[in-house]
Image (cartoon, rainbow, N blue to C red):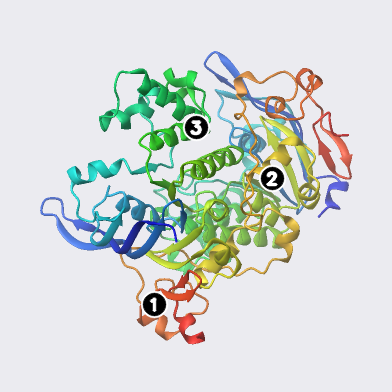
Amino acid sequence: MPELLLRVDDLKVHFPVKTGAMFRRKVGAVHAVDGVSLTLARGETLGLVGESGCGKSTTGLAIMRMLAPTAGRIEFEGQDITCYGKKQMRPLRQRMQMVYQDPYGSLNPRMKVRDIIGEPLVVHGLADDSGAYQDKIASLMRTVGLLPDMADRYPHEFSGGQRQRIGIARALALEPSLIVCDEPVSALDVSIQAQVVNVFVELQQRLGLAYLFIAHDLAVVRHVSDRIAVMYLGRIVEIAKRDTLYRSPQHPYTQALLAAVPVADPVVEASRRRVIVSGEVPSATNPPSGCRFHTRCPHAFARCRAEVPQLRDLGDGQAVACHLQETNA
Amino acid sequence: MERAAQTVPLLSVRDLVTRFRIGRGTVTAVDHVSFDVGAGETLAIVGESGSGKSVTALSILRLIPDPPGVIEGGQILFDGRDLLKLSDAEIRNVRGNRIAMIFQEPMSSLNPVLTIGMQVGEPINQHRRTPWAAALGMARDLLGRVRMPDPASRISAYPHQFSGGMRQRAMIAMALACEPQLIIADEPTTALDVTVQAQILDLLKDLAQSARSALILITHDLGVVARYADRVVVMYAGRVVESAPARELYARPRHPYTRGLMASVPRLDGDTGKRLVPIEGQPPNLAALPAGCAFAPRCQHAIDACRQTRPPLHDVGSQHQVACILES
């Protein structure tokens, strides 16, 4: 069993909803993340999938401690970082980095690529004026497939795929053990996505990085992940090894999500059995009672409306939060 | 569906050229594009950003902002008439009436200060000269047909009160209002979640089929194409590089770009652990396209001749055309 890198227990992130122009009163809360537990081993990739508003990005930000968790526990490299302040987090930030979705918004347009990639080293006091710093930047650029002579250019001179490589090089600068990737390829054209996905896969093999790979594209997530967690309205509804999840999804939502994604083959599509769930994701301000999926679930029964299902271990690393599983067992 | 193309097509785009003057240069967004759409057929136009697929769609309805854009040449034959030769009043009578369009972003394409009922009823009132009271009643029925819950009260609601999926349903209702012969849907579900995407596309395809409307589906998603299209046109750098019936295209892609696209996209049922085969290089710069084949700089098989002359679109099988000199 590889060493555990990250453990998240019953993580909750609630955002207050306020009203009133002068005397702001709290009138409710958005339960963006509501009881998420997961683990990540060194060198492993955990895919986190779900539709917009399911809390996958908030989970990533809370793990990075860029958001304060409302409740729960986050343990990274053996330390409980849940309540760490800025100062305490600082040395740990070298070990955990993030790659963002938008390759345009996440790079400072007025900085040269050299300075963007080197900034983490400067911030953490690891940069000196010696040639070693410049060599490091050149080697980081080569690592992600950029030519070091491009170092003095500005972000606008690069295409979307190249910008994403710059963002990856910046994340690698401090040699982290964990990279949280939030929709890292979804803004890229399909022919470029594959290039960037390959960069992620190759870097992991070479450097032993762990990824929390947050995305909505189930095919991309399947390609890069060892295990996958499916989120719906702030909760994990199913978590399993990659092949198990795609071969025998147990939660009705996972099944619906997989069925909704078309396969790029007309022959397969013509013969595919498809369950299309109705409706849309309800609001996280006022989530449905019981199982949050019950309003759209074709199999829902009375208990689903009343009682919140807990994640139940089905063996072989698969766990599902669904009352049907207990009834069948 | 495949029979339709043998008779006179409903829409026939011939050598369409649309250019934009930007700064000192000119960008040819649509470069001698030709394709047909048969009555009742679903045609997918596939391509990445900048391939010219959306500009092609906007050109058909003459919705290109001028300046900076201008349709410089070609013909758009719709039901026997060249849409490029119609007067402004005549083309307005085609838009939303004979040809309807559904846009990608349902929030910015709906008017925020008009009720949904007014917006769905407007084409009926405009084109059919139906009085508003009756048009609103028809709008309610249309909202029911796109399976909007509680349509009677929804007609007096405003777009901001709707979710993304519901707005797109309203857009579809609006498109269907005058029973058009052709519906053009430009990335209709890109802004939506996957489970909602499946609902909307199924609905669109069902309704187009039952109204016997032809459908042009513009997308970058090869899965969506496989699920819904009868025929496919693949575009690259403003040009058509390949055109074929959907099954034929997926079974026997001939253009190196089409093949590259299919190999670079991970599939839900594909081999895992296999390295994706990306298309190397960068997307083309439309302001500075190379002479010859636009894909040549990224093509592994390119030979000198590819860089010199632009390959014409030629037949390589029944209804299968490709623009590559290496494929004959």
Q: Are marks 3 and 2 on the same chain?
A: no
Q: Nearer the viewer, mark 3 or mark 2?
A: 3
The numbered dot on residue B262 is 2
Vertical position of residue A111 compared to residue B105: above or below: above
Q: Are marks 2 and 1 on the same chain?
A: no
Instruction: Write down the quadrant of residue A308 in the picture.
Output: bottom left
Q: Which residue is mark 3?
A: A143
Q: Which residue is mark 1?
A: A309
Identify the secondary structure beneath mark 2. Answer: helix
Q: Where residue B79 appears, x then y in whole percent?
A: 77, 43
Q: Where residue A6 appears, x then y in whole percent?
A: 35, 56
> Which residue is at the far top?
B24
Q: CA distance from mark 3 to mark 2?
A: 26 Å
Identify the secondary structure beneath mark 3. Answer: helix
Q: Nearer the viewer, mark 3 or mark 1?
A: 3
Instruction: Write down the quadrant of residue B268 in the picture.
Output: bottom right
